[in-house]
Structure formats: structure tokens, C-alpha cells
């Protein structure tokens, strides 16, 4: 794992929470309670209904439980890694990385590759690519992606190699506690087209859109060492991440 740049950590964590507030705002709703910000998609999956704890000294699950119960969805929490949080069950550590515009190194061009905004008529295709890339249900993925295609705060992108749809990514623009930022979510490429630079190109295109629209920070979450190395080549720096908790009710 790369050396963590602590000066970016607080802003990246805040920007991550800001992006999830956007996710909630275009879906089932958001709420701010003492020490925590909550969002909900309304979908029956804990990873898509979640909160960001920013002050463990005052955050309490009781009100969170009531809020999510009213929506009838499972949920989880992101807590700053290493903070003492005695509630629920620790699931895993979520890595974070941040990128300032001046450090951005665009990805090399990939012959035959085009990247364009995902249109409403592309939704089924994009959902299949995302679901296959991440091992999820196509129907659930489509339901999650649908609001992003029409929201001005989102920039879903579709990659086509020689005219064949092969990859997806979504950029989320936020203007919250962390200032102007862009979150990069769901970089997915079909297995048979990986290791050709398509994931890097998708990530770079999402970052470029964010910076062109005024973002002064890009952030994302590598889930493998290979992904971390890819993002490092684009200029991203490792920061402190989150501890993920579930079973809080």
C-alpha cells in the first residue's frame, strides 16, 4: 500500500460523504443528525443506504435506526478508520485516494476507444456491463444507475472499443463540506477487455470532466492493489480511509 498523505485525508473523507449526499438527494433522501450524515437509495441493499460518521463522540445509532426503519431498507456506516466505534459489526476497511488538478496525469490514448456520456437509451447496456464487472444483479444495478443518467450532478460515461460497449464509470460533482469535488465511482470494464488501459481512460475522462466543471479535488476508492497502482499513475495519492460497519439495528 502506498504511503498515506495525511494532509489530504480530512478533505477526501468529507468529499466522499458529500458525494454520497448527492447519491441520496437524487434517490430516496438525505438527513443530517448529530455526528453523522445519512443517505438512502430506497433499494434493499445495505451498500446503497449508508451514513458517514464525522464525530464519534456524539453520533448514536438510535436516531439512525429510526430513520432507516421508516424507509424499510438495510444500511451501513462509514467511520473514519481507527476511530473507536463500539456499535454494529466491522465489515472491512475502505481505502481512499485523492487527486489535486495540478497532479493529474491523463491516461494514454487507447486505439479504437471512445468514451461518451451514457444516455437514457444506453441504460440497459451500461447496467449489464456494471453488473457483470462487479458481480451484481442487473436489475438492481439498473435501478441504482437510472437516476444518474438524468441528473446534472452526475456524469455517467460509457466506453466503446471499436464500437463495442466495454466499460462504465460515473463521476459525481459535489459542492459540500469539502468544497468543489468530483467523486469517481464504479469504474467497471468487462473481463475480456481489461489490461488494455480502458479503466485508466475511463477514470481520466471522469476526472477531466470534474476539473473542467470547477472541481479542485478528485477522489475514489481502490478495491485492489492493481487498481491502486492504476490510480497512482493518474496522480492520485493514498489517504486515510474508512472502517465499514453493518448490523447496527
Image: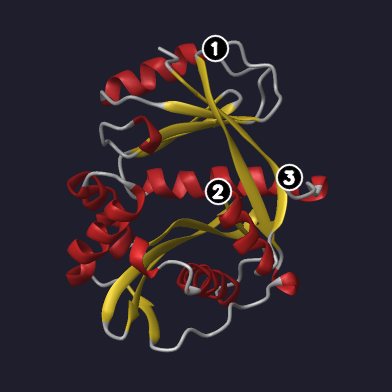
State the image quarter where residue 98 is shown: bottom right
Give how far across and how far down residue 175 sits, in percent.
57, 56
Q: Is residue 108 visible?
A: yes
Q: Which mark is residue 9?
A: 3
Along the line of sight, which residue is nearer the eye, 7 or 234?
234
Does residue 233 appear left or right of residue 93 in this picture? right
Task: Determine whether label 3 and label 1 are within 8 Å by CB.
Answer: no
How far is mark 1 from mark 2, CA to CA? 27 Å
Q: Secondary structure at mark 3?
A: helix
Q: Residues within 10 Å of mark 2 (few under 14, many from 20)?
A: few
Q: Residue at x 30, y 39 (%)?
A: 28
Q: Which mark is residue 150?
A: none
Residue under label 1, please give it.
87
Give how far across and how far down residue 163 sits, in percent.
27, 84
Q: Residue at x 61, y 66 (%)?
A: 215
Q: Residue at x 40, y 48 (%)?
A: 23
How far is mark 3 from mark 2, CA to CA? 19 Å
- Nearer-N-terminus badge (3/2): 3
Task: Determine whether label 1 and label 2 are within 8 Å by CB.
Answer: no
Give how far across and how far down residue 105 sits, in percent.
67, 76
Residue under label 2, please give it.
224
Q: Secondary structure at mark 2?
A: loop
Does residue 226 appear left or right of residue 81 in this picture? left
- Nearer-N-terminus badge (1/2): 1
Q: Secondary structure at mark 1?
A: loop
The quadrant of the image that shows the C terminus is top left
Amino acid at each position: 500500500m502506498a504511503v498515506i498523505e495525511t494532509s489530504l485525508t480530512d478533505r477526501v473523507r468529507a468529499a466522499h460523504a458529500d458525494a454520497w449526499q448527492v447519491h441520496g438527494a437524487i434517490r430516496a433522501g438525505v438527513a443530517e443528525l448529530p455526528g453523522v450524515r445519512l443517505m438512502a437509495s430506497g433499494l434493499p441493499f445495505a451498500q446503497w443506504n449508508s451514513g458517514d460518521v464525522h464525530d464519534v463522540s456524539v453520533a448514536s445509532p438510535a436516531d439512525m435506526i429510526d430513520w432507516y426503519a421508516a424507509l424499510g431498507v438495510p444500511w451501513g456506516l462509514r467511520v473514519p478508520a481507527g476511530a473507536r466505534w463500539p456499535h454494529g459489526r466491522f465489515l472491512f476497511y475502505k481505502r481512499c485516494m485523492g487527486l489535486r488538478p495540478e497532479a493529474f496525469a491523463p491516461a494514454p490514448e487507447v486505439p479504437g476507444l471512445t468514451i461518451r456520456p451514457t444516455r437514457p437509451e444506453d441504460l440497459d447496456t451500461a447496467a449489464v456491463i456494471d453488473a457483470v464487472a462487479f458481480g451484481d444483479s442487473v436489475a438492481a444495478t439498473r435501478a441504482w444507475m437510472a437516476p444518474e443518467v438524468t441528473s446534472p450532478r452526475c456524469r455517467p460515461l460509457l466506453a466503446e472499443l471499436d464500437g463495442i460497449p466495454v466499460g462504465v464509470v460515473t463521476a459525481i460533482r459535489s459542492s459540500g463540506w469539502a468544497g468543489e469535488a468530483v467523486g469517481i465511482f464504479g469504474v467497471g470494464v468487462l473481463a475480456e477487455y481489461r489490461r488494455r488501459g480502458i479503466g485508466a481512460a475511463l477514470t481520466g475522462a471522469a476526472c477531466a470532466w470534474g476539473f473542467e466543471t470547477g472541481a479542485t479535488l478528485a477522489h475514489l476508492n481502490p478495491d485492489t492493489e492493481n487498481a491502486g497502482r492504476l490510480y497512482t499513475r493518474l496522480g492520485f495519492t493514498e489517504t486515510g480511509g474508512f472502517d465499514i460497519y453493518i448490523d447496527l439495528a
